[in-house]
């Protein structure tokens, strides 16, 4: 999964859809976040209720990788 994520993030950076920088490190950090989200769900008393909350936080994290408008 990390290899697929890295490839997608490299293509997104080349296309300007995410900010450049150290894409391999960024991919590793995103991958770790996804894994930790899974661990949160695994330990949750109510994973069905927590899934949308964790998914929303991951969306926020990924959104932060987008280049800022005008910047």
Image (spheres, rainbow, N blue to C red):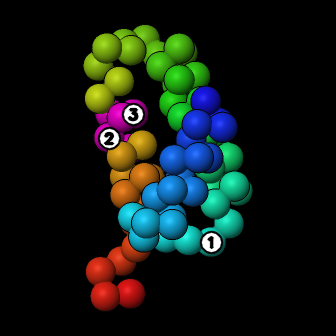
Most foreground residue, 10 or 61: 10
Q: Is residue 7 visible?
A: yes
Residue ID for mark 2: 56
Q: Is residue 65 left or right of residue 29?
A: left
Residue 68, percent from left and from top: 36, 77
Q: Is 62 above or below relative to 41?
A: below
State how far apart marks 3 and 1 are (Cα).
Answer: 26 Å
Q: Quadrant of the image for the C terminus?
A: bottom left
Q: Quadrant of the image for the N terminus?
A: top right
Residue ID for mark 1: 21
Q: Is residue 57 left or right of residue 49?
A: right
Most foreground residue, 6 or 44: 6
State how far apart marks 3 and 2 are (Cα).
Answer: 5 Å
Q: Nearer the viewer, mark 3 or mark 1?
A: 1
- Main secondary structure of the magenta stretch: helix
Sequence-first tag of 2 and 1:
1
The verdict on residue 56 being magenta is: yes
Dots 3, 2 in contact, CB < 8 A: yes
Most foreground residue, 14 or 67: 14
The residue positioned 51% from the left and 47% from the top of the image is: 8
* Element class at badge 1: loop
Residue 59, percent from left and from top: 36, 46
Residue ID for mark 3: 54
Badge 2 crowding class, 10 Å Cα cut-off, few under 14, some 14 to 19, many 20 or more, is: few
The residue positioned 44% from the left and 53% from the top of the image is: 61
Give the quadrant of residue 2: top right
Range drawn in magenta? 53-57
* Element class at badge 2: helix
The residue positioned 38% from the left and 15% from the top of the image is: 47
């Amino acid at each position: 999964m990390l290899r697929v994520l890295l490839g997608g993030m490299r293509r997104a950076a080349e296309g300007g859809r995410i900010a450049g920088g150290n894409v391999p490190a960024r991919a590793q950090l995103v991958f770790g976040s996804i894994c930790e989200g899974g661990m949160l769900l695994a330990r949750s008393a109510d994973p069905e209720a927590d899934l949308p909350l964790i998914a929303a936080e991951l969306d926020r994290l990924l959104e932060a990788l987008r280049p800022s408008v005008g910047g």
